[in-house]
Image (cartoon, rainbow, N blue to C red):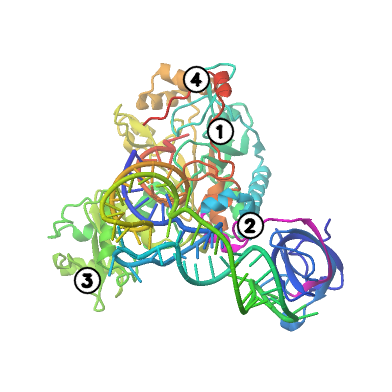
RNA sequence: GGUCCCGUGGUGAAGUUGGAGUUCACGCCGGCCUGUCAAGCCGGAGGUCGCGGGUUCGAGUCCCGUCGGGACCGCCA
């Protein structure tokens, strides 16, 4: 039907007779004999010079045959890749008429209510931005597959209908028709299956897997999302990092970005320097140690504090008036800090602050020196427990300093040595696993499992890109004795182990190789590489924050007959 | 479960101290127009101010509730 695509023709094609197909992007009329039609497909736009006799309107589907002609110098459109040429002597076939679209099929629809864009997603996707995003996504998927296969990974598909394992995220459940009252779950991830594939001798498994979690939706979370899921036998952490690193570097390259070496950092260092376990390395503003500066201070808010740190937010003193500073203080308090000290650096280098008078000369000088204070800078200081101080300043650092996603550059980071346990379960008093209960402890810390569990490091690690957590993984426990110790610690007895994880643990008695793996979110990766703040922009048909699809109207009630067949009765709504 | 923001012709916005469904831009329909490229000019049509209730002589505007969308907290081992 066509000889070329709409974004393809250049000066070198002048003189050729061509046929294009596409949608009418715009039409500019100049009387009876002349009109310009910009014909658009996924590749771009070409100007066609036509007789203004056919009724051709926005989004009509056309087939245009004509001759490629060079435009006179004064009519070249430098904004268009095809702007040096146009199609003349056009014969136009209307392949389909179209009603006026509810919003313009152009970048002008970027401001249209997202709900409307989702309701007419097939029109939204016709736009250049969405075409670009979906094609980046396809290129990233393809690059990941190639990288994994080049490293000997075997793609294995795992089931979507799996048993319910009510640990972790809330599951979607699916009623069984043949066994009314019993249910499948949709997989939160292929975690258990991929480890069994290691027992099964697959050696290196990967899959671009759909995962489903019935948790509240966010800018970076959908009910269903895609992960690159991988598992390897006979490896240590570094082997996993290398393999996954190769895949994500290839993914970035497929999107046109070079990333450089992937940095590695312990969890403790990340918290200490950046106050978060997923630092954005694109900017500085690091947390600076001040505890020793105030070891003998008279200032009550700082005296005796376990940990005092500060950040220099740069030349923001003027921008941050009393209201905004009160806002920052509120935010700090909501995150658990007792307060927030702010200091503005005056032209003469002294501090302007309600608490400036409580700081000694030596203390003020040390703060100036440690934080490289320049006139006009805004300095924020928190004094509290180590974790609170770090977390609060880490959040403020992100709030004040983080560049927008689309600015790049792209800085991958491995965060390693996560704590084995995070917090204590209120009901049982037992430590809660930070990753999952099959995570191998750090070999140097195994002896502390019973005596000092909260200080045991695990062989769990996260991959971070520009402040977004892409995913996590770990070296798994393959020794039944160690697994038993972990379950003991967590307070999961033999009976519960068998009931919840029997199908998973029993196979490990038949010769489980040492193994470990990783999974990262493709939607998040693609969003960052495409410069989008929201993963819905890189998903063809996403759901709204309430889990609905404005185009299909899902979810919907089902008939009484369907429910009856499944042995299900719906309760009246709670009122 | 919670906090905050938004909802006004097809689209995006403005709407002051409560005073007539009002305004602007784009789009749409009709006309003019032979070099535009977000073409231009002239004319026209198009509204359940999300929905329900309340206060008031009078509500887009104030109050209560509700629905929808979004950001965040909780949640996401």
Using the image, name the chain to which the residue with label 3 belongs.
A
Above-or-below relation of A82 to A435: below
Q: Which one is in front, A200 or A554?
A: A554
Q: Quadrant of residue A66?
A: bottom right
Counting residues from the start of the chain, the first of labels 4 and 1 encountered is 1
Q: Position of residue A305 (x, y in %)?
A: 20, 52
**Which is more toward the observer, A276 or A44?**
A44
Please give left or right for residue B21 compared with residue A88 in the image: left
Location of residue A461 with respect to A283 vertically, above or below: above
Q: Chain of mark 4?
A: A
Disc 2 and disc 1: Cα gap in Å?
42 Å
The residue under label 2 is: A101
Q: Which residue is mark 4?
A: A502
**Going from the N terminus, do you reach mark 2 or mark 1 first?**
2
Q: Could you tell which of marks 2 and 4 lies nearer the N-terminus?
A: 2
Q: Is B30 rendered above or below residue A212?
A: below
Check disc 1 and report the residue beneath it: A190
Subunit of label 1: A
**Magenta-colored stretch includes residue A91:** yes
Q: Residue at x 59, y 60 (%)?
A: A257
Residue A262 place in picture, x, y as percent: 52, 54
Residue pointed to by mark 3 = A351
Q: How many marks?
A: 4
Q: Nearer the viewer, mark 2 or mark 4?
A: 2
């Amino acid at each position: 039907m066509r000889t070329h695509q709409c974004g393809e023709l250049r000066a070198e094609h002048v003189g050729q007779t061509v046929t294009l197909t596409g949608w009418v992007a715009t039409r500019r009329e100049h009387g009876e004999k002349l009109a310009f039609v910009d014909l658009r497909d996924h590749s771009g736009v070409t100007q066609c010079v036509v007789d203004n006799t056919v009724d051709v309107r926005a989004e009509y589907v056309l087939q245009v045959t004509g001759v490629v002609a060079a435009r006179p110098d004064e009519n070249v459109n430098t904004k268009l890749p095809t702007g040096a040429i146009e199609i003349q002597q056009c014969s136009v076939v209307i392949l389909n008429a179209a009603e006026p679209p509810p919003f313009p099929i152009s970048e002008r629809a970027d401001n249209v209510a997202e709900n409307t864009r989702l309701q007419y997603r097939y029109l939204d996707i016709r736009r250049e931005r969405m075409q670009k995003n979906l094609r980046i996504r396809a290129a990233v998927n393809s690059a990941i597959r190639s990288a994994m296969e080049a490293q000997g990974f075997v793609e294995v598909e795992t089931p979507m209908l799996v048993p319910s394992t009510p640990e972790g995220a809330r599951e979607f459940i699916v009623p069984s028709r043949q066994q009314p009252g019993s249910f499948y779950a949709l997989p939160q991830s292929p975690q258990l299956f991929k480890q069994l594939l290691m027992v099964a001798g697959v050696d290196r498994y990967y899959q671009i897997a759909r995962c489903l979690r019935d948790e509240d939706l966010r800018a970076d979370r959908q009910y269903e999302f895609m992960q690159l899921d991988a598992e390897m036998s006979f490896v240590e952490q570094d082997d996993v990092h290398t393999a996954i690193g190769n895949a994500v570097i290839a993914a970035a390259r497929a999107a046109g970005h070079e990333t450089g070496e992937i940095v590695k950092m312990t969890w403790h260092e990340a918290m200490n320097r950046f106050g978060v376990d997923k630092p954005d390395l694109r900017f500085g503003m690091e947390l600076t140690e001040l505890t020793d500066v105030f070891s003998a201070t008279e200032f009550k808010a700082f005296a005796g504090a376990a940990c005092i740190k500060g950040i220099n937010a740069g030349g923001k003193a003027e921008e941050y008036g009393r209201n905004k500073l009160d806002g920052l203080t509120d935010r700090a308090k909501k995150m658990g800090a007792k307060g927030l000290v702010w200091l503005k650096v005056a032209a003469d280098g002294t501090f302007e602050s309600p608490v400036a008078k409580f700081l000694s000369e030596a203390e003020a000088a040390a703060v100036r020196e440690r934080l490289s204070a320049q006139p006009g800078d805004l300095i924020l200081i928190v004094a509290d427990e180590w974790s609170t101080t770090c977390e609060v300043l880490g959040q403020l650092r992100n709030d004040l300093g983080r560049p927008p996603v689309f600015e790049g550059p792209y800085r991958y980071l491995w965060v390693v040595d996560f704590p084995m346990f995070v917090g204590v379960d209120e009901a049982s008093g037992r430590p809660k696993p930070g990753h999952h209960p099959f995570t191998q402890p750090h070999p140097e810390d195994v002896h502390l499992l019973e005596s000092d569990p909260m200080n045991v490091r695990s062989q769990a690690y996260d991959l971070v890109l520009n402040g977004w957590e892409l995913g996590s993984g770990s070296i798994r426990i393959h020794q039944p004795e160690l697994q038993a110790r972990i379950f003991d610690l967590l307070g999961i007895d033999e009976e519960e182990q068998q009931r919840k994880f029997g199908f998973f643990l029993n196979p490990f008695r038949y010769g489980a190789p040492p193994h470990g793996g990783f999974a990262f979110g493709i939607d998040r990766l693609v969003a960052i590489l495409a410069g989008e703040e929201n993963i819905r922009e890189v998903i063809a048909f996403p759901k709204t924050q309430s889990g609905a699809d404005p185009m299909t109207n899902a979810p919907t009630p089902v008939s009484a007959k369907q429910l009856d067949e499944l042995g299900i009765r719906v309760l009246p709504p709670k009122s």
